[in-house]
Image (cartoon, coloured by chain):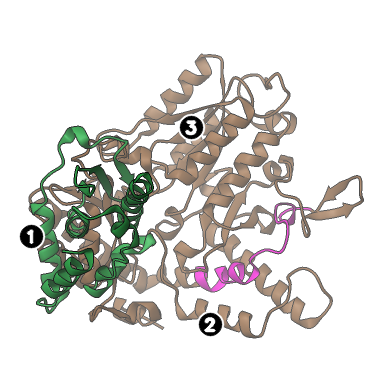
Chain colours: A brown, B green
Amino acid sequence: MFNTIDELRKEFPALAQEFYGKPLVYLDNAATSQKPLSVIELMDRMTRLTNSNVHRAMYRLSDEVTSLYERARDVVVKFINAPGRENIIFTSGTTASINLVARSLADAPCGELSEKYSCVGNRCSVNGKFLGKGDVIVFTGDSHHSNLVPWQLAALRTGAEIEYTRLDKDGCWSITQLDSLLAQIVESGRRVRLVAITHISNVLGIINPVKAAVKVAHKYGALALVDGAQGIVHEKVDVIDFNCDFYAFSAHKIYGQTGVGVLYGKKEILEAMPAFMGGGDMVDRVSYEKTTYAPLPLKFEAGTPNFIGAASLAPALEFAMLLRKDEMALEIERNEKAIKEYLQKEFSGIEGVQWYGNAPLQKRIALYSITVQGCHPADMAQILDKMGIAVRTGLLCAEPVMNHFGVGVNSGSNTPQGMLRVSFAPYNTLAEAEYFITSLKRCIGMLR
Amino acid sequence: MTIKEIEDSIVEEFSMFDDWMDKYEYIIELGKNVPLLEEKYKTDDNLISGCQSRVWLGCEIKDDGNLYFCADSDAIITKGIISLLIRAFNGQKPEDIVSADLSFIDAIGLRENLSPTRANGLVSMIKQIKDYALAYSLKK
């Protein structure tokens, strides 16, 4: 057990490594988190011993795997306060979850979905599909590629259009702005079919008002999907309170195994959506001519899933729950606040450093993307690496956001592309933040 | 000097440095001193895109039948390494460039910079230099 950040660090073997003779300072947690012992031990045990295919056979070993897999689903239900197990679909990650929705809705007939959600007198597209000409999919402008490209593809496939909320100078969008965008679409005689909302931006670290955004989406008869890739890690997610129709997240960013994700969906909507992939495990009856599908959630889980990875969600989310309890939660909150205050103060004090995503401290997480005048992010990352510090640089899978701040691929040949991002987890210390700043200053001194 | 002789002299220069800091400081110095490629040459034609840093490379053959390169990058460490490559390759015969193994990069401890995962454009740049050299050696 752990009561302090230092004790918490002992749960993560990866944090005890050294590189180039320096202790690893891992500040790329928004890309993936390190794994605690409880997760490592479960995966080790399942690989060595408790291994057989899930949901298939009539022997003890298979029962054990199935129960570990399904237990993870129960833990997810509890973690996000979902109504039940049929709301939780295991996928390969946030990206796969969003693609599942985009792909399935692109194939969906208008009828059932539209009756429940259409705003403009249940009108369907001429082709009788849920998505078609005159339909609009809206996403928030701070989205990373996973919450953007799937919608572009769905639009291409169906003839629907895409729209997005513009970002202000700090990289924010507002509820008023979202509301007027949707109003504009509806006034022009088109239908808003879905609003895809980024919970927390992976570039800016700003926590968006998802509950209010979902409400606006519903006001205009649209479905609301929340991209929780970063949100699940830092915020309490209550899908009933949010009232979102979908919530997508990955296991690997919240202490679980890579290659696994979750799609939460409202039952009546998931039921009205057509199957996305075909294969084993998702079927009810199959003949050479026709197939009927298994009930939720298996309808969307075709083929052998990453059952060890999915099972890892149980210890991973249980670990996350411990971090959100009592004294430890307060300790983590204090620590995170101290890191944010320290970094903002230091960044503002170094000449030529620009940090993005200005918002009140309680509305942002300890994730900062910066640019430094006269220093290329790739050069800085390379030198910081030699000091044992792991940071992320480049376009951060969010090219439109980079373009917004003038550091995208279209920036002039003298403007380096991309940013340098540091993203902190509960196990990162203020001392690490201090070491990062000292190293950053040294690195800037070398490069200028 | 042959490419090999130049490579050896670079390796000798780098042997003076005890730690990576000195080495990187030297590379950064080299990067700062490389004559800048004029803006007009930084065209998309000459651009070799790495994922994170951009490299521009121009190549010409002079009357002596040897190749001459000019290059630039928006990242200074990349630029420093480029200056080492240009030092080794400038004024060399195309066929010698084609067969150069560039083992000096490993010898001076910069191998990680050539890792494809670093995506800094250097790997593509060396490929491009070799492609130019191959094309010219076939023309002869």
* Residue A447 belongs to the span the image colors magenta: no
Residue A281 horizontal side relative to residue A247, left or right: right
| Start-end of magenta stretch | A295-317
The disc label shown at residue A41, or none = 2
Q: Cβ–Cβ below 8 Å for labels 2 and 3?
A: no
Residue A173: which quarter of the image? Answer: top left
Where is residue A199 shown, x and y percent of the image?
43, 47
Q: CA distance from mark 2 to mark 1?
A: 44 Å
Residue A305 visible at all: yes
- Graded by Cα atoms within 10 Å as few (under 14), some (14 to 19) or many (20 or more), the crowding at tag 1 reads few
Where is residue A196 shown, x and y percent of the image?
50, 39
The disc label shown at residue A142, or none = none
- Mark 2 and mark 1 lie on one chain; the one further toward the N terminus is 2
The disc label shown at residue A445, or none = 1
Give the foreground label among 2 and 1: 1
Q: Residue at x 30, y 39 (%)?
A: A408
Q: Residue at x 40, y 42 (%)?
A: A209
